[in-house]
Image: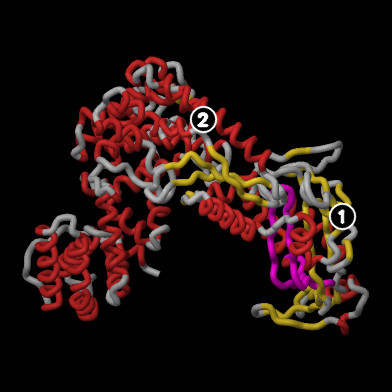
Amino acid sequence: MNTNDFLLEIGTEEMPPKLLEQLSIALTNNLVTQLDDFNLQHGKVESFATPRRLSVLVYGLQLQQADQTIQHKGPAVNAPIQAVEGFAKSYGVTKADLTQKALGKTDYYFFNTQKKGVKTTKLLPNIVNTAIKKIPITRTMRWSDLDSSFVRPVHWLIMMLGTQVVNASVMGIKSSNTTQGLRFTGEREFNIKDAKDYQKTLFKKARIEVSFKARKAIIYNQVMGVAAKCQANAVIDEALLAEVCALVECPHAFSGVFDTQFLSIPEEVLISAMQSHQKYFHIVDDSGKLLPTFIAVANIDSNDLSMIVEGNERVIRARLADAQFFWEQDRATSLQLRLPKLDQVLFMHSLGSMGDKAQRIAKLSASVANIIGADINHSGRAGLLAKTDLVTDMVGEFAELQGVMGGYYAKNDGESSAVVNAISEHYRPRFAGDDLPSTKVALAVAIADKMDNIVGIYGAGHKPTGSKDPYALKRSALGLLRMIIEAKLEINLSHLIYESARLYQSNKIVTAGIDDFILDRLYTYYQEKGIDKNIVKAVLASTRNLKNDACDSVYNWHLRIEALSIFMQDDNSIALIEANKRIKNILKDAKFSRVENTKYATKFDKNLFEATARAFSILDKNKNDYKIVIEQCLGLKIVIDKFFDNVMVNDDNLEIRAQRLSLISWVRELFLSVADIAYLSK
């Protein structure tokens, strides 16, 4: 089989940095899928991505499709002769040229034709065009007078097999072997002589590292090296590192300084200004104290960066001066006095203002605090003031600091440390793996805030779909569950939803389905912990229909799920699962009354009754200790097996039948006190 290396490079204007990796992965996956669909074999595939190019290198691509034998199915062997001859004639042959083959219990006539494989060069234009079109891009751009669109205007295209250019036109651009270097240094335009030398050629000619992974490693090492020269430690945020990598093709890290007077501003402000706004890395001393130095990465190959350093220092100085002004101005007005301004800020159409939301959070925070044992007054106060920093100048400029600045301003106003801390932390957890609020007061406010968002937005009809969640309700629900479970809070979910909806005082809020929406996130939570979704399903199935607070407590469900996970690791679990499934099926249509007498027909009935009674007795003494309950259930394995091996539940004697149905229903109740393990049957 003849093969050669295939190179695809799409040259564009600078692409959105936060989308670059996603675009690169999508292009590579789509291209591989298309090659496979056309039965073109190949070897290793490499992806490359810089701000101005998406590239894929396919090693050992088959140069021509293999010839194919195509089977055409005709009539059954016992079909009328006219049908058989007509089928043969349609392919220009006679009945004698047909073959016979059995399909199921019937023999059919077949005729085989040979299809010669198409050359890869003829297939590649369509393959590449389709791979590009299938990249998921929310907003595309058009350029010139072309009908084509892409994430950014496309300026050049390389499609090569080995040393040869593939004759093609994609998105209005004719393919060649010419690529572009950096805009301001080195060769601006040069040729790729061989597809396999693509990465090496870009680096040699223009100092461009096209491998995203390799370039990110270069940036990391450069930043760490610059920090070492400053006798300090660089703080490298992974998301920032990836974003910087998507902004430069030829990285060159350097350091700059800012005036020490700015260190009087909260360090979160300084870090946000450097990291989010300027894409700088901040550095700290050995004790973790922020230093008045930043590290930036230029996109240039030069030994003299003095002008670039000076320019960056001038920019950060202006931004920090603004931040200092906001800090001084904001502290002149207390958060309490800012409350009326929240009435002028819309929370959401039909859901009122942020002022309305603040009043709801205050009341709900106090209600949650009463349940979890937090200080009610502090929780209500923190809930009332939690959103007031939204109308400060600092948060207007640095939106990512909402909550954090509220904490600083609350401290400036002389609020209690509990209130200060709760305001600072009430957005937690913001993302997967983020820290939880550190105090019960902060937990109360955070739970109230997330519940208010979910009930209001979901209840107003803005339900997330599988692919769209514009209000991040799924993240809010997952954060809510994390707080309840990991802080071990006994909270009745339905009551909390009802209380939140009641505070809206609007008939437009529909709570139906909200609890199910929140609980659906449990599957995500436990999946990340490696727990099978059927375990979660088994627990929810046994509790959702029981009318008591313990059975509507997320933490209670968590304890059951933990116990059931232990149960599944025991060798006896499979037999007990099948026994439960059998009991469930027997009881499904059975009609009987509960029999309380202890006179049993056989020793097997009696043994099962006594073993189950002992288990219930232990359960009564160990409420909510589901691990002990599971131990008792596992201990019933032998007695349950002997019962089913030796007796007939649906005995001809109606009294015995009722007694046995009553007995096995009691056994099922014991298991249901943890979960409906019949859901775990394979």
Q: In terms of secondary structure, where does tag 1 sit?
A: loop
Residue at point 35% right, 30% down?
408
Q: In terms of secondary structure, where does tag 2 sit?
A: helix
Q: Which residues are magenta?
A: 37-63
Report x, y in % for residue 600. 9, 72
* Residue type (three-letter) at the residue carrying disc 1: Ser
In this view of the protein, which residue sits in the foreground, 479 or 306? 306
In which quadrant will I find the N terminus? bottom right
* Residue type (three-letter) at the residue carrying disc 2: Leu
Instruction: Report which residue position mark 1 lands on.
Output: 175
Residue at point 74% right, 59% down?
203
Q: Give left or right: position of 384 versus 51.
A: left
Q: How is the image coloured?
A: secondary structure
Q: Is residue 9 magenta?
A: no
Q: Is residue 459 visible?
A: no
In this view of the protein, which residue sits in the foreground, 414 or 642? 414
Report x, y in % for residue 669. 21, 60
| Of pointers 2 and 1, the one earlier in the residue sequence | 1
Quadrant of residue 337 within the rendered picture = top left
Instruction: Report which residue position mark 2 lands on.
Output: 320
